[in-house]
Image (spheres, helix red, strand yellow):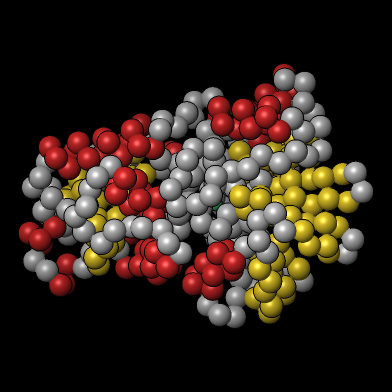
Amino acid sequence: MAHALITHGHADHARAGHGHVLATQETLDIMRLRYGDDFAASTQAIRFGETMTINGVNVRFHPAGHVLGSAQIAVEQKDMRIVVSGDYKRQADPTCPGFEPVACDVFITEATFALPVFRHPDAAHEIALLMKSVAQFPERCHIVGAYALGKAQRVISLIRQAGYDKPIYIHGALQKLCEYYQSQGIDLGELKPATLEEGEPQDFAGAIVIGPPSAFVDRWARRFPDPLACFASGWMRIRQRAKQQGVELPLIISDHCDWDELTETIREIDPAQVWVTHGREEALVRWCALSGIPARPLHLVGYEDEGD
Ligand SMILES: [Zn+2]
């Protein structure tokens, strides 16, 4: 696209190769880390709440509470304001500013977990389960699968909030993003590379290792001593899915809204219309209809979810 407005750095929302990219400074930094310096012909940073006018349309970015730098985008012309949520959540996250409800005529919402079965417990509760397991099995290595952008840093931050102050070991794929979060003032404590070459396997007994889902399913994870597989994702609500993936300790931690957060957000914003995209469109469109809110699905082709 000649002109792209980007909500956040996940691969299903941020692609390389656009002409001009407008995004928060953090999202531009993250795209640079992931795609290299030439990810766009030109870039421009916008601050939360700042208004820019593009071809007569006012554009503002507002915090989405999803990952560092994540934004909703409000576009406004005459009396019509449309807000694109991007991905968002309402649970507190120590690694990014919280979602800000913005009054609008049309609210375009994501719907990754838009089924009543999806209810995310408090993330601190899930981390308490991890801490309990670490205390209970001091000889085992707890390997936590978490998406590289956002989820991994949030999980580390929550582990620190729970009082764990030993080094946390990270897979190489997380290193650049963890360093970036730390450079932005997010305290992740002491992180060490989870490379077996540098130490004997027994060094990792009792340790917490964080790795991306891709590494988690391959041989990498099985090289650690008596590994206990954990996975931090909203999909872990589906126990069968956890079981199929060989996850011993599922942690229901999501950077997306659950069903209650979605419906409460729509009620709070009270838009004239809702357009639903990125997920389970039908259920949320149906809920809107039953609640007297005009709604329709907005199908985007070729977009796969990253970072649930
Ligand atoms: Zn995302």
Q: Residue at x 13, y 50 (%)?
A: 206
Q: Residue at x 19, y 38 (%)?
A: 133
Left or right of 206 on screen, residue 270: right
Instruction: Pick the residue in front: 249 or 120.
Output: 120
196 lies above or below 37: above
> Can you give x and y, in whole percent of width and height, for residue 144 in the image?
29, 49
> Can you give x and y, in whole percent of width and height, for residue 306 in the image?
51, 53
177 lies above or below 300: below
Q: Quadrant of residue 246?
A: top left
Left or right of 220 on screen, residue 29: right
- From where the camera sits, is residue 38 visible? yes
> Can you give x and y, in whole percent of width and height, for residue 177 in the image?
42, 65
Q: Residue at x 21, y 68 (%)?
A: 195
180 lies above or below 140: below
Position of the N terminus by quadrant: bottom right
- From where the camera sits, is residue 284 visible? no
Left or right of 87 on screen, residue 216: left
